[in-house]
Structures are given as structure tokens and as C-alpha cells.
Amino acid sequence: MTFRTGVIVGFCVVLGLVWIIESGAADVFLEATRPDFQKIPLGVVGIDHVGGPESPEGRAKLGSRMEEVLKADVRRSLVFSLVDLSNLGIKAGGRGGEPDPSFKQAAANGVSVIVWGKAGMKTDTKTPDVSMDGYVYDAGSDEVVGGKRYAGSMSVVRLMAHRFADELVFRYTGEPGIARTKIAYVSQQGTARELFVMDYDGFEARQLTTDGFLNLMPHWSPDRRFLVFTAYRNRNTQEIDMIELATGKRWTLVSQGGLNITPALSPDGHFLAYSSSHEGNAELYRLDTRTKAVLRLTTNAGGDLSPSWSPSGRELVFTSDRSGGPQLFLMSADGANVRRLTFDGDYNAAPAWSPRGNWIAYVCRTLKKEYKLCVITPDGQKRMQLTTGHGVDDSPSWSPDGRHLVFSSTADGKSQIYMINADGKDLERITFTGTHNSAPTWSPAS
Amino acid sequence: MKKLPAIYLPLILGILVVVTPACSKKAVQSGGDAQTFQQETAKSGTTREGTRRGGVSPNFPDTAFSGRNDSSSLRGLDRDPSEERLSSDAGSNGGFGGNGGSGSNGNRLMAKSDPGAAARQLAEIRAEQIASAAAELRDVFFAYDSFSITDEGHHALSNNAEWIKSNPNTQLKIEGHCDERGTSAYNLVLGEKRAKAVRNYLVELGVVPDHLSVVSYGKERPFCTEHAESCYSQNRRGHLVVRTGN
């Protein structure tokens, strides 16, 4: 290395450091949940079945189904800890929302919130109709702080419980909760891979496409109306398509020849970042969704792909193999200020920037050559491996509250979809049917 | 990077101006796929919205997020709650509408989907398989993480090149495939590198580039699905297909 090259390399490194120092904290928002966050102790007394004719699934089942959904939502909220009330002598409040005298013992037993409700079939409608009332007692203020009344068809039994759970989270954090969010994913149907969408807990799966070939790597629009994804025209050419969930209507957004992969809409929906190889190798581009103008973001001999937006929309993290194996890089949304983020291991890919800004999740290859989930801070200062063991983990996607990740893994043999907390706890499998479920992507909250 | 004496500052700035362009030195690109793309669009009439302009549709809806409160927004707890009517998808999930009250069974299909598409694709795949088997084209296999063609691969491609040259009216598709290890996204890039390596070698052997197209399937269309090297080695391949129709 000549002296001049040495000086150049040296100053490039210094420049890189300055950029990291300048931009490192820009996208980190204050966390609502600190690592030592004390969960709020909440007890669900029960959801009783009242009045009306029996539901098609039997009297007890309707209420207990809702109760089961509600408890799972409360547990997954990570805002509350679910308290077992059965040994505390606390009884359900009145069916009109009146507190029970036993509630007085709640605070003494360390319970902050008590929830109870009733569910039943409505008699005054032609079609089978369900109603649910839920009430919330707050031990701190020693009063029933409010309730909700829901009505709808048998198809919304789970949704009632989800919506009530989100109201609880909203009441105590001001955030909308994740119980009504959806996960879009790819599922094998015969020899084809089609797009599906399901509730965040794996229920209510719905097929979106029937192309009979490959539809890959869906990604949500910020208003939850659309998915963008990679499709194959006549099996020979890739393109980036968009589908409207409500209608199934399709648009081809990008069809430039070569690879057209890993589309990601910016948090404000104004830009679509994607990777295309129509000018040679895989490069990143940015399409303005209003003017339809395309800006090329990267120029190098390596493959650039998998862009993920920072919550502010000012930066992108992406995969590039410009330095050998795939590694994570950061850059500004206009393609400037490119710098490498990951240096551990020889394979780091599929980054996903947390909606809170503080972590970037990705797939890291371990020393044992296993593909696992890792997270790294955008300044590169902290790094953690979240999953261990056999199986290929892929496609991490954050919950809108930044407390969970959904991803695919072959840990149990076939590729299935799993959920895990951002700290690596509470691994939970959420798909159980089919031969292949992959590429999960978590919807924004509503 | 603590405090530098102020005297060095002009010097550093001066050097930065000189060396910065070197930091962003552009690399040379390999040949693009514009030609392949033009062939594809000429052959396939678009059935979807929009006409093409440089490969970007001018007619898709604006995806900008208005941030408006929609019907799915939470309304908060109420001391005297009034009834909220929920319908599946719509209402609770803002804009997911269209299926309200249609029952709780899963796997509901979208109204716009084309149930005949899958059957057509299967028939076309079958026709391609028959034509490809008749041509006795040989596939090329790759090492883990690699897109270099082996000696065995070179030998296979020499045979293939002879067949292609003696069948000048044939259009050939080179599919790049990967094993299940690694991410879906990066394997699409790797698959394309494998397919292009095969194409480039065939062109070196004198095959007319216009007769070849490349497509990457990454790890999405594996030839076998066991979690073992015997299977992985089958899936790391450049697969040659005789195109029929489209």
C-alpha cells in the first residue's frame, strides 16, 4: 500500500466515523418500555355467557373463547402481566359494569387492573349476532374507569376480544396495541407460493393471490390498504406488484427486467425502495409513488438488496455483498453517506429497522454456519443474537409496537412462522398447517 | 477523535476535498438485462393496470399515508359505552373491508383472483418440462455459496451449446436455484449470479445471446426439500428449460 493510498483509506475511515457519530442517534426514539419496565398486573375475572339463545358452539364456549383470546392478547401486549385471580377471592363485577365489593382486595394483593365482561347471542336480529361487553376496574383510583360494548356477526368473536385488548393497552400507554394487527406471508399451495394474510396470532388466515406460481416477500403500505411484493410474469420475468387487500385489485409497479425484489414503502408512503438488476447487478432504486420518478441509490459491483426504512424515513439499512459476503450497510434516503454496519461474521442479511428506531433485526450466520436472528443498534455499538439451535431463520419483521418480531424458521422441519420478543424471550410458533409458510411481514397498527 | 489543535483544521479540510472523490469511486457494471426485458414485454401482453414507461407503471394509486383517523381507530373506554358494531376485516382493520359478515371460515379468496391462472401455469410448466426432457439438456451444479461453474459444469454446458446451436429456433430459459440455507432475498441474488454465469459461458461457447434468458428463483422452487447436503447439492443449480409459447 503506497503512502497516498494509506492517507486516502485513513481519511475514508475518519469520514465514515464522523457520519456514524452525526447520524447515529437521529432515528432512535425514546422507548416507552425500558428494560426494567414494570408490567402492570392485570386480572381477567372472566367473560360470562348471558341471555339469548345458545350460540352455535354452545353456551359456555362463546365467552370462554373470548376470554382465552383476551388473555393471550394481554400476555403478548408486554404492557400487562396477567395475574391469576382464582385464589384471591376476587369476583366479577356486575353485568352493567358495577364494581364488586371484592375489588377492594385487589390493591392489597398487588392487582392494578381487573377486567370482566359478558357475551351473548342477540335475540333481536335475524342472523345470529354476538354481543360482548367488557369493563375495567382500576385499583389505583378504586373505580370502574369504563367499558366497551361490541356487536357483530359470529365472524368477529375473536376480533371483539382483540379490540378490547387494544383498548386496554391504549388506556394505559396511549399506544394502539397490536392485537388487531395482521401478518402477511407466503404459503405453499401445491407447487405454487401465494400471498396470505392472517391475524397476528396466526388465526383467520385468508388467501390473497391464486397466480399458480411464485409471489414473494410481501411488504405493507403504511395505511395497511396494500401489499407490495415480487411476482413473476409468465414465470420468466420478475416484477414488483401491488395488491389492494379489500378488493384483490392488482397493479404492476416496476417491471424493469432482471431481478425486481425486496420492495419496501417508506413510512410516509411517498417512496418505494427496491432492488433491481436491470442495469447489471442488483442495485437499489427509489420510486416516488406520486411523480413515478425513479432515483438510483447505489452504484457498485456488488449486489444491493433488502432496503428497510428508518422510522423517520431519512435513512435506509440494506444488504450488500460489495465487500465479499453479504453485510448490512446504512445510507441516507437519497443514497448518500453509505457506511457498513455489521462486522461480526461473514453473512448478515435481511435487515428490518424497528419502528421505534433503536434496533435493526437481521439474519446472522453463526460460527456453526446456522442462520439465526440477531439485532444490532443503528450505531453498531450493541449486538445480540436472539435465536439459537438448528433451522434456518429468515425474514424478521417487527411488530408496530417494536416489542416483537415475526420470522420464518425451519427449526421444526418445514418452514413455519414464529413470534419472539425483541429481547429473545417467549418464542411462539404461530402457523401449524401447510408444507411451507415464509416471508412474514407485520402490518402497521391502527 | 478528541480535540485536534485548531491549526490542523484547514489542512484536514484541504485533504478531505482532495481524497473524498476516491472514497466514492464507482465500480464498473456488468452487462444489463434491458434486452431480455424488451423481449419479455413484447411477448406478454399486460393484463394488469397501466402501461409501461421505463419499466415503471404510471398508473398505480398514491400510497402516501394521510394519517387520517379511520373507522378502525380506537375510541377509548367509556363510562357509559355505546354499542360499536364490528365487521370482519372492515371497520376493525381500516380498509380491509369487503368481507364483512361472510363467515369466520379461513382461506376466503379475493373476488378478483383468477382461479384458472394456477391451472394454466401448471399446463405450461408441464409443456416446458416435456420439451426440455426431449432436448436432453444438462443442468449445472454449484458449490455452497458459489456461482463458479465447475469442470463438470463446463462439460455439461459444452454439450448443451452444441444442441442449442443446432436448434436455432429454440428459446432457452436459464433458471438460477439455491439451497434452503441463507435468506430468501439474498438467494435470489445468488440465483441470478448462477444463471448469468451459465448464460455467459454458453455465449462464450458461441450461443447467440438472444436465444437465452435468465431468471432467478432463489430457494423458492427447490428440486427436493430434505434438510441434508444430498438434497442441498441438488438445489444449487442452473436449470436449463426450453421455452414453449409465451
Image: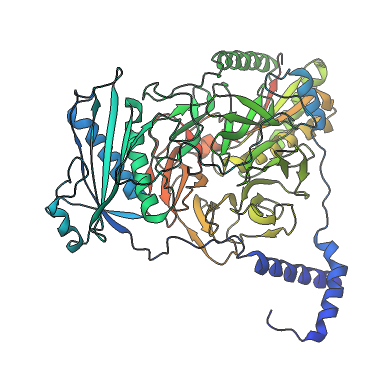
A33 versus B182 height, above or below: below
Residue at 60% from the left image edge and 47% from the top image edge? A267
Residue placed farthest to the front in the image?
B80
The answer to whether A237 is drawn above or below residue A285 in the figure is: above
User: In front here: A14 or B88?
Assistant: B88
Asked whether, in this view, residue A63 is left or right of residue B64, the answer is: left
Which residue is at 42% across, 61% downward? A33
Q: Nearer the viewer, residue A342 or A171?
A: A171
- Is the N terminus of chain B in the top left, top right, bottom left or bottom right quadrant? bottom right
In the displayed structure image, the side of residue A324 where residue B36 appears, left or right: right
Q: Is residue A310 at least partly visible in the picture?
A: yes
Task: Tell me which residue sits at (59%, 61%) in the image.
Answer: A378
Q: Left or right: where does residue A94 sit relative to residue A199?
A: left
Q: Position of residue A241 (x, y in %)?
A: 64, 30
- The colour scheme used here is rainbow
Instruction: Point out residue B193 in the picture as x, y percentages from the top left corner.
Output: 71, 39
The x, y position of residue A35, in whole percent, is: 41, 64
Give the percent coordinates (x, y) of residue B213: 75, 27
Locate residue A50 relative to residue A159 in the image: left or right.
Answer: left
Residue located at (77% from left, 36% from top): A278
